[in-house]
Image (tube, rainbow, N blue to C red):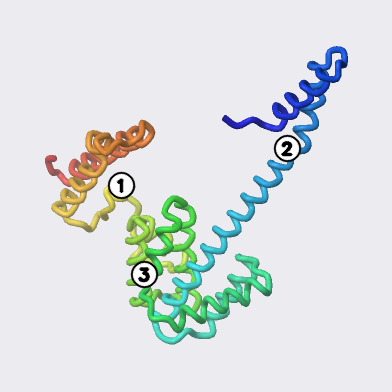
Amino acid sequence: MAFNGKIIGGIIGMVLLDLMGVPLGAFFGFLLGSVIGHIFIDQSKAIEDTQSEQRAAQRRRGAFIYHLLCLCVRIAKADGPVNRLEIQFMEQLMRQRLKLSEHGRRDAIRVWNNAKRAETPFEAYAQAFYRDFAQERHRILDMLDLLFALAAADSTRLHPAEEELLLRAAGLFHISRLQFDRIKARHFAPPAQQRPTWSALDPYYALLEVTSADTTETIKKKYRQLALKWHPDRVQARGASSEVLRHAQEKFRQINEAYEKIMEARGQKR
């Protein structure tokens, strides 16, 4: 059981003044001691906690930048040697978006050059990033967006080799094709005749991690996989907490609803 500074100081003050025979010493001692304890213990602990949180946040930011540089190198090299426009984009990214100091910029360049010389495959870098940030969904989406931005730095059309790597990243990051296409559209506008029209079924396809272009058999197979994964009985059997179980129940309901809507639209029976 943890005691805060007010309680510790109050108890010490109460005992000391009471032993000294001060009238109402226990009462006044507790009040005085709690004030002193709050100042010298609680506030010092609060400062230490804040500093610790700041250091942790800086480490997370540094880890994200490291992964970003390694992945960017592989995207930049996918369509040939790294060119001047890609270098300019990275310089702008470091100075304006990441706001790196000169020391931080030198460290970033060192990481970039090491990754450039290394033969580590793109998938290894992507998997390492996902392991570190799997619980921070906004970071995952931000990473894919930045990789698309780099790919768009030197061309208005996405190179097939770059798109292949970005699709692999989306798969490893568990980003749906619908989300992938939305991020892509922010950087590469498709020709008018190729622009997909929005459908009310799009969210349901995204829930099942498929697209409207997939066959009914493919959708059925994916549905069975997801239903098995999120079935509340299986989740409960794994010893999940009540919160995780509630999440699984809601996910299972959404999956079934999405499947029913899609099958109904396709004139299929479950």
Residue on which the image places disc 2 = 41
Q: Quadrant of the C terminus?
A: top left
Q: Secondary structure at mark 3?
A: helix
Q: Is residue 193 visible?
A: no
Q: Quadrant of the N terminus?
A: top right
Q: Few, some or many C-alpha atoms within 10 Å of disc 3 (few <14, some 14-19, many ≥20)?
A: few
* Mark closer to the chain start, 3 or 1: 3
Q: Residue at x 45, y 52 (%)?
A: 137
Residue on which the image places disc 3 = 124
Callout 2–callout 1 Cβ contact below 8 Å? no
Three-letter amino acid code at disc 3?
Ala
Query: Residue 95 at x, y = what percent?
Result: 64, 71
Q: Secondary structure at mark 2?
A: helix
How far apart marks 2 and 1 lie (CA) works out to 50 Å
Disc 2 or disc 1, which is closer to the eye? 2
Q: Residue at x 52, y 77 (%)?
A: 112
Q: Is residue 83 left or right of residue 25?
A: left
Three-letter amino acid code at disc 1?
Leu
Disc 3 or disc 2, which is closer to the eye? 2
Residue 117's place in the image compared with 102, above or below, is below
Q: Is residue 266 visible?
A: yes
Q: Nearer the viewer, residue 45 or 33?
A: 33
Q: Is residue 136 left or right of residue 208?
A: right
Q: Few, some or many C-alpha atoms within 10 Å of disc 1 (few <14, some 14-19, many ≥20)?
A: many
Residue 207: mark in rendering: 1
* Mark closer to the chain start, 3 or 2: 2
* Mark closer to the chain start, 2 or 1: 2
Residue 202's place in the image compared with 86, above or below, is above
Q: Residue at x 64, y 30 (%)?
A: 3
